[in-house]
Amino acid sequence: MTAASTSTDGRVVLIAGAAQGIGRAVSEERLAAGACVAALDADGAALADLDARARARGEAGRLWTVEGDVADEAAVAAAVAGAVARFGRLDALVVVAGIGAFVPLADLDLATWRRVLDVNLTGAYLLARAAEPHLAAARGAIVTIGSTRAHQSEPHGEAYAASKGGLLALTHALAVSLGPAVRVNAVSPGWIEVGDRRPAAAARLVHHSDADREQHPAGRVGVPEDVAAAVAYLLSDGAGFVTGQELVVDGGMSVRMRYVE
């Protein structure tokens, strides 16, 4: 993968869930690549920090932030309209926003179930629907962030797994419906070390044990930048013949046979 094949200099991308974890890495990678970023997130403080870091790097003119809930139809419409008003066009949509609710089934109340699906799945539908005319005009691309939990589960992940499985199905449905004007793909991460990526917070970044890391064929767990690199490829002209696909970024864990010894 060359720099030329992944370049999106000057293009405009709306990133939902842009200010934290994987979304923050995607936002900062796109800014570093020269793109204009419309950053939507429900956490105003995280957005303010993203903006401050962009200003320190001289990127403020290419970042627009908006606080909002991806499950809110009006908020999504306002974010898309605001991005187009600010930058004059929309070339790409990256849907990172997501939440989990890992509790026993007996404790998984209907309101929690609905909230997880509203954010993780309905939000992607709302964003794609609002952005589609602008993306079609630009012959752009959508990337959704799924999860390997769409294919394999741990206990008590019913709402999360269902939402991510639905997101993968939505991804290939959109690819067929919106093609050839808009390409639509998914990136499904495995274990990713998320959190505050600043050096001062390194002690709080570690969430996995040495055994967790060593069982990965890649020899480590992932970091948000691994996912951002995959997103960059799928948004690029180098992926012009790729649509309706899922790119699994999990260090090889999904292909490794594991048995209790």
Image: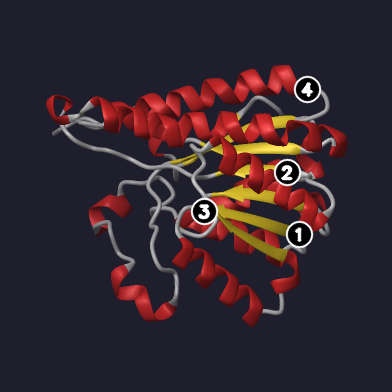
Amino acid identity at mark 1 = Ala
Type of colouring = secondary structure
Q: Is residue 153 above or below residue 9?
A: above
Residue 21: image location, x then y, percent: 45, 57
Label 1 neighbour load within 10 Å: few <14, some 14-19, many 20+: many
Picture quarter containing residue 172? top right
Bin the neighbour count of mark 2 within 10 Å (Cα to Cα): few under 14, some 14-19, many 20 and up: many
Tell which residue pokes out farthest to the front in this image: 74
> According to the image, label 1 marks what residue?
35
Camera-side residue of 12 and 130: 130
Front residue of this view, candidates 129 and 57: 129
Circle 2: residue type: Ala
Q: Nearer the viewer, mark 1 or mark 3?
A: 3
Q: Give the mark, 2 or 1, whose residue is nearer the N terminus.
A: 1
Q: Earlier in the sequence, mark 1 or mark 4?
A: 1
**Marking on residue 92:** 2
